Image (cartoon, helix red, strand yellow):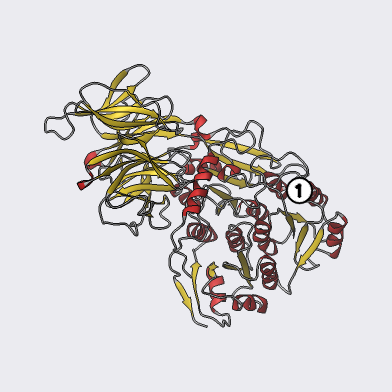
Amino acid sequence: MNSRARRGLAALTSAATMAAGLLGAVAPGAQAATADVTGGQIGLYGGSGGIATINADGTGLRSVPGIENSGHTPNWSPDGSRVVAGGSQIKTGRVTGGTSLVTLPWAEGVRSSASYEDPAFWLDGRFVVFSTGGQLVYGPSDGSYAPSPLLTDAQEPETVCDVHPTASPDGTLAFERRANYGCYDSQGIWTYDPDTDAVKQLIASGSSPVYSADGSRLVFTRLVDDWTQLFTANADGSAVTQVTTDPTDHLNPSWDPANGRIAYDAHTTHAGHSNDQQTVRILDPAAGTSTALTDAGSRPAWQPLRKNGLNRIYGTGPIGIDAAASRWTFDTLGGTHQPGWIDAKSAVLINKGNATYAAPAISLGAQKQGPVLSTSSGSLDESAATELKRVLPKGSAVYLTGNTNLLAARVATQVEALGYKALRLEGTDLSSMSARIAKQITATPSWVFIADGNEYHDPIAASTAAGALGYRGTGVVLLTNGKSSSTSVQNYINALDPEITGLVTVGSVAEQAFRQMPLVNGWSYWAMDGATHEDVAAELADFWWTAPTSAVVEDTWVWQNAVAGGAVTATYGPMLWSTEASLSTVAENYLTKRSASISSVQTFGGNVSYPPANRTAIANAIAASSAWVDTVWAEAGAPPATASARSLRSAAPDPAQSGRPETGAGVKPGEHLPVPDRHIAP
């Protein structure tokens, strides 16, 4: 199965749409992200020292350890949590040091082996775009697959060189285009719009464009009377205004994210001359003043600081965690649609006392577009009945997972008395039941995840990954009974074509069970075999997701939280396990390395599961610091009307009437995976 095919224009279009959605009020009470952007430190190219940072008042100059930098402007992610720079390869890292470095793979399909230049974050930190040999190249900021050319040969012929890309929050890229021999002749500033796949000239004369934090303006340079001066313009190219006039070369401009000031390199003579003295200065166009910042670095980049979100969903009173998760996601039937919520099309019932039998319900609910609700084995709990009536139209399917010893016949009768269709999915054991649920989703999945059903952690992680493919029924989870599996599971797998179906074993026991199955076909597959359940979940998240915008942290010891939360968040981002007292190291490392793209984290359950130290560690991992994370307390699944944090629903365009939410910014889970690393003969 070829899983490394290059992503097409449709994916970029979806990515740009998502990025635009991040900036709108798409959750109840949410404010536009840019409304809270302010200016932080200024990053500098520090010569042989790599990267330095300095406060905007000139104090606090410090060298950043561990991040090599070969002349790049250390551009920041949109939330200010990471910088992008690097030596021979592009790297991203935290300015607290190089302990969370991400190295982007070597670019593929490019015209030359020229050095990489001008890296910048794009599409709300999910991607990095840069120039090499005059060709624009992009790849995910978490390095999950190799960067590749952005534009076609028709859009970017070999006779031109495109350099200095800069990204607007709405997804538009601006860049400088040069032409003719050696690419010395500037053709001005051009833009690429991924929504329309259009490349056009914006400003006839100009170099080194940089968007403001809100995307409304550009600053750029232009040669005037033999000196390089600073100009500003509106994002549409109008209102071009010269803002410097002194006989100095003004290079490498960068906007203050908050108030319109511009940091830049000032050269006493022309840049590159032997007697030139270079200083970083700050221009205030409104006041008409320019002040010196430092002469200890160059190529300034002003840090944007933006609030990310930690969303705390928990039950209260008669509303348990399952109903709270449902209320966090699904509109009230017949009520006013809330932006970001979706319509329930089904529901899944589980026995509230059986963790492993509940695990497959996550993928079923995620792909049938409905909540997973818990009930007693003997009868339908009033809380489950209340939530069914709140979200689900009469006549809809309600899936009962398990035999009558798990959910009695009376439960089905009570469901039908409410006006729904009760559909029981059962089997002679857990393994057989998982195959029955898989068949209910699809007989021809694109992906199969196998986990050991004797313990709930790996099955829940596997089921969440399977459900990540959304409401199209393309991913399933199959459970084994330790190292053995049911005939139903074996028959399901043997009916599949390994050339078109991907297979992932989740946990070392599941792999052993798979290798012992009587198979009619040879399989190439991937194995997630970390030492602990936390390791396996993080390894699966790393394998399956590309620079996600959202993630879920689940308490390792409360499976009810994970099942309820996984079913409603699987289509948005990965699930990570964490211990109660503090954030697990493996979860912290995962979040930190993807902090450029992750703007919100969800947790399901009360304070016992996520004490202050745990929450603070999550906040520190996804933002510049915990001070730049707003916590939304969604009691009974309903965030307060004053909530201003970026929520789960700001991770995708509003999908309420379109059938399914986007699974991230255009890159579906499972795309761009490496070649399978394990093989088994029939």
The answer to whether 149 appears left or right of 559 in the picture is left
Does the image show residue 611? no
- At x 64%, y 68%, the residue is 454
Q: Position of residue 187 (x, y in %)?
A: 29, 39
Q: Residue furthest top?
A: 287
Q: Position of residue 377 (x, y in %)?
A: 80, 61
The answer to whether 555 appears left or right of 88 in the picture is right
Residue 328 drawn above or below residue 498: above
How many numbered tags mark residues here? Answer: 1
Three-letter code for the amino acid on which mark 1 is drawn:
Val
Q: Which residue is at the front of the view, 43 or 24?
A: 24
Q: Position of residue 565 (x, y in %)?
A: 64, 51
Residue 580 drawn above or below residue 512: above
Quickly name the residue at label 1. Answer: 391
- At x 28%, y 22%, the residue is 244
User: Is disc 1 placed on a helix, strand or loop?
Assistant: helix
Q: Which residue is at the front of the view, 105 or 64?
A: 105
Q: Position of residue 116 (x, y in %)?
A: 29, 49
The answer to whether 237 appears left or right of 382 in the picture is left
The answer to whether 114 appears left or right of 215 in the picture is left
Dot 1 surroundings within 10 Å: few (below 14), some, or many (20 or more)? many
Q: Which residue is at the front of the view, 152 or 403?
A: 152
Does the image show residue 40? yes
Residue 202 drawn above or below residue 388: above
